[in-house]
Amino acid sequence: MTITKTLISWYSNNKRDFPWRNTTNPYYIWLSEIILQQTQIKQGWPYYEAFVSNYPTVFHLANANESAILKLWQGLGYYSRARNLHATAKYIVAELDGVFPKTYKELLKLKGIGDYTASAIASICFNENTAVLDGNVYRFLARYFGIATPINTTTGFKTFKALAQDILDKKNPAEHNQAIMDFGSSQCSPSSPDCTVCPFNSTCVAFKEGTVASLPVKLKAKKPAKKYFNFLVFVSDFGETIIEKREGNGIWENLYQFPLIETKKDQDEKSFLIELENHALIEDLDYKLYLYNETNIIHKLSHQHLYTKFWVITVKQLPDAGIPIEKIRDFAVPVLIENFIEAFNF
């Protein structure tokens, strides 16, 4: 039995039922793929349902306000995905009359769509013979063929992409791609897979050689940078606070946060008061300051770890334009800020 026949046989008995599995509409497939990038299915599923409910077509998404999209995305992280989602929806509506490209090469040209997403949409929606290559597929191929080439290298990508393409079922690429991804996720899982019941255990190189736990190989990423964030949480006697929109191309672009002072090291109250002396919002202001969290809240991002303190500043009147505290939940904020808002019980 060939690899693809074994995969399809396994899939027919173990296929998981997801809403995006019951359609070939490229808009819904695209939504699901973008949402599930770097997100577990159990976490991403409710977001998929929310987006489909709020924006049932690409036209609805294109016409939406970015802040509303970011608010709906809140908690998923990697917010550039949401911004790219919106930009691509607007492009498809304005330039392509709302019609998705039907080929891998054309899909690759869209913002936020890479090799994997283009392959998934092209094969599932338009039956194009292009193989998907995600973490689950990498893992299965590396173990089955016993390949130790690091997957996060250019050579690794080329090697595994060619292999995935070679074993692709050319008569049914859509089902094959979904089968191999499901197999890698459920059966050939990252840790402690049950190889004794695997339909490939008689031909799997890693199982024969005892290297299942060490494959696939991935080069270690650079150690995340440490950053020290100090948020100023203003609370006025009139029940107002200050939030600001993050600009630029850094993390949390276009999301809202409390005024921020970034420092080179951790701050106690004495050292932070010195940092505050020349801050525009504090100048000539009569205020009281207290630290909300004595221990840093560590917020881990892929490339940096944020050591965070929230400094509550009580004032009679705000030094700048503010918002009523009861309105703060209307704004799209990073999960770090969202968690504080809930804990502080604004």
Image: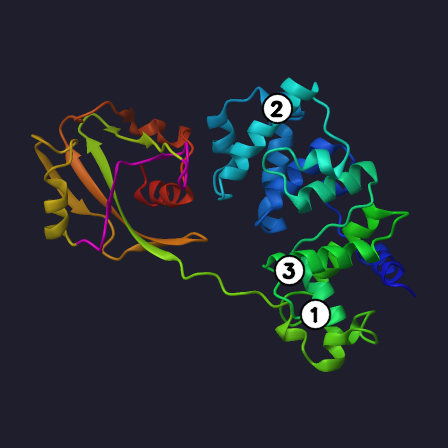
Residue at image coords 16%, 26%? 319
Residue at image coords 36%, 42%? 337
Q: Residues within 10 Å of mark 1 (few under 14, many from 20)?
A: many
Point out residue 268 in the picture as x, y percentages from the top left corner: 16, 54
- Residue situated in front as seen by the camera: 299 or 13: 299
* Residue 260 is one of the magenta-drawn residues: yes
In the figure, residue 236 lies in which quadrant? top left
Point out residue 274 in the picture as x, y percentages from the top left corner: 10, 46
The residue beneath circle 2 is 91
Nearer-N-terminus badge (3/2): 2
Question: From what the image shows, is residue 122 above or below residue 68?
Answer: below
In the figure, residue 24 lies in which quadrant? top right
The residue beneath circle 3 is 155
Disc 1 marks a residue whose amino acid type is Ile
Q: Residues within 10 Å of mark 3 (few under 14, many from 20)?
A: few
Q: Residue furthest front?
A: 155
Spatial CA distance of label 3 from label 2 is 33 Å
Numbered disc in front, either 3 or 2: 3
Q: Main secondary structure of the magenta part?
A: loop
Question: From what the image shows, is residue 310 above or below residue 205?
Answer: above
Residue at image coords 64%, 60%? 155
Numbered disc in front, either 1 or 2: 1
Residue 147 is marked as 1
Marks 3,2: beta carbons within 8 A: no
Nearer-N-terminus badge (1/3): 1
- Residue situated in front as seen by the camera: 8 or 130: 130
Helix, strand, or loop for circle 3? Answer: helix
Spatial CA distance of label 1 from label 3 is 12 Å
Range of the magenta residues? 249-267
